[in-house]
Amino acid sequence: ASRLAERDDATARAELAVLETMGPEHIAEEWLSAALHPELPDLDCPPPPEEMPHLMRLSVLELTRELVELTPGYRLVLCTSGLSVEDVAELLWDSRGNITHLEIFNMKSWMERQQANLKPISELQQALNEGLGPRVKQIIRQMVRRMRTVDEERAAKFRDILHNVPKLWEHYRHKPLGSRLGTSSASRITYGMGFAIKDTLPRKGRPARRYRGRQLFEIPICSPVEEVLSYTKPRNPSIWQRAASYLRWLPGCSHLGLECRKAWKTASEDFHVCGQGNIMNLGGLSPAVGNNLLGKKKDQAGAAKPGAAYLNSSFCNWLKVLLGFVPAFFSFLYTQDWWVLAWGGTFIWFGITGVRNVVQMVLAAKGATRDTLIHWRDQVSVNRLCDSLMYTGISVLLLEVMVRVWLLDRTFNITVAQSPWTVFTVLSIINGFYICAHNVFRGFPKEAAIGNLFRSVLSIPVSSLYNSLLYYGLLAWGVATPELYLVPSAAVVSKMSSDSVAALIEGYADSQVNLRMRRWDYRSKLNNLFDCYTRLELLFPHEDALIKLARPGGLQGSGGAKGKDLERAFIVNALDLMYIWFYQPRAQDAFRQITRAMPEADRNVLARSQLVLTREREISQLLVDGLLGRNFSRPLAFFLDKRKAYLRRLSRMCRPGKMREPGMTRADRAKKRSSPVKSQSV
């Protein structure tokens, strides 16, 4: 390509254009076609049967029988691209039920207009699956009429099929003829990344007709789906779920405290062609692209501009704060006569929101306790804080200007001095709906969104309490008429009460998210650990290898390469669990919940596997040798400083008799405690 570009004449440019667009299809057409290879048999004019290979001499029935014998539970899919309904019926008859599925739709073939017979093929498939003998006869009779004018020999064969229709649909009466969908995305020109049913996608996951410049086409395939809701007991119920479980006897409350899970049921044999389908291709259709032999052209590179998603994060955060600050600042200037709130109300409002968000995020992660090494600043999400400041700035315009001044004061002549309960109730209700709406838009946990909807009820008495405290505080300060300051401060007082309640609701929701994430972390690591323990027991069936692992030297070469790999895996898993314990939010609470549900034997194995951390010298050498990269000083200091405290706390949690084993009653636990036989401890 470089040499052709240097020549830059008409011949070179033409050859370069061919190279730029060359792909698998071009190679197949230009170099692998039958016309260029006369030594290969021509399928249009086949040679005599005795000169053909063995597989090419087999009939459809013989070929499908050989394929059936390859593997049990097979699926033999017939691609319908370029086939008519007569071809499909004839192949189904010849194979005698060995064809199990039809590729009812192929994206590439459909775009190349090779699937003009989708509807009649789908009707034949449905008639066979539903056992509709008269309908199958009607379809075959129509085929006979069409074949009379085209091929009398095939017409005679279809008449034979017509007389033996029960034999045809008998093959698929008990095992329906299934459906398959395909894209044939095997080259640079892709036809999507697979298919999905629209009903099963969330609303945000349903793309529009255009997706990143790619046209999405309506696919004429329908699949009936059934939404199934199941209610199960949560594995680790929260305080609210335990409290709600006592109210299930009330009418309409049978599912309180249970987890709702949504599933979808469909069957491949139910795919059928329809006018407006509910199947869509993921990713759209990408246009043909070149091989980029000479790099991007200058005009193309200049025209390609990144979108708003590529803006600098700091710039986006400042822009969010500015979008919230401007309406809040002018709202206070418009509504307030007292200079403190007129010029400083926005800073007070933003200060309440900022402090509440920081405290909420830190407490939700337990980032201020001595048991962890998490710094409180690491738990504060700057992006989330700036989002909150933007939405709270917009709420000033809503609550202060539109609701308190325009609606309540000027329209209904209601002020805080006359009826504080009415003002705070209206402000709290509207604020609750506003916060719930933007929580749902931002993708917050449903507990936080629903809780913020009802937090207005809780913030009403809190608002009155704050208002009373300010009233008596101003009186104690020596202010003769506190109403002059309380009336314009109604929105700020409502904001303080609302954020006080929000700190509890959203903090609880955030803590549950952290717990769920930590349970995922621990379960993945514990699965790896118990898998290693199983392999260790198989390698050393007659001795306690976990005790060996905890001693200096470890397995000392026994077990060969497998033993060495297992020893390293135990060390890595123990270090990972130690890191999660100290550096992940709510990790110790999640570990306590998981071990509480474990049998005593599993807790014993878990605690003993962590004793590999007592091998200080070997693990330190591993860290120095590059187990975690070149910057090993901080991980090494962390390991040497915290391993003893970690093992002490973990062994205390896993101590036999301390945790409730599943299925044990209170009498069983009392009997176990009084038994003279002691369980093996760490």
Image: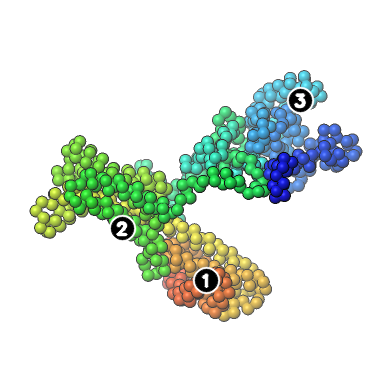
Among numbered discs 2 and 3, the one appearing first in the sequence? 3
How far is disc 3 from disc 1 in space, using C-alphas?
Answer: 77 Å
Task: Check residue 158 in the rendering and tell me which mark sits there, or answer none.
Answer: 3
Q: Distance between the residues labelled 2 and 3?
A: 81 Å
Q: Give the x, y percent position of residue 654.
A: 46, 69
**Whole-percent x, y for residue 99 in the image:** 72, 38
Disc marking residue 355? 2
Amino acid type of disc 3?
Phe
Upstream in sequence: badge 2 or badge 1: 2
Single out the mark in the foreground, 2 or 1: 1
Q: Name the residue under label 1.
A: 631
Question: Which amino acid does the dot numbered 1 rest on?
Answer: Asn
Position of 42 relative to 4 (above/below)? above
Which residue corresponds to the image point at 51% horizontal and 67% vertical from the top-left? 576
Question: In the visual, does 650 lie left or right of 217?
Answer: left
Residue drawn at 50 percent across, 47 percent down: 306
Which color scheme does this rendered protein use?
rainbow
The front one of 418 and 588 is: 418
| Mark before the other along the chain sequence, 3 or 1 | 3
- Whether residue 122 appears in this view of the structure is yes
Question: Which amino acid type is marked by label 2?
Answer: Val
Q: Which is more foreground, mark 3 or mark 1?
A: 1
On the image, the x and y values in percent for residue 473 come to 15, 57
Q: In the image, which disc is placed on residue 525? A: none
Q: Mark 2 or mark 3: which is in front?
A: 2
Front residue (pair 142, 390): 390
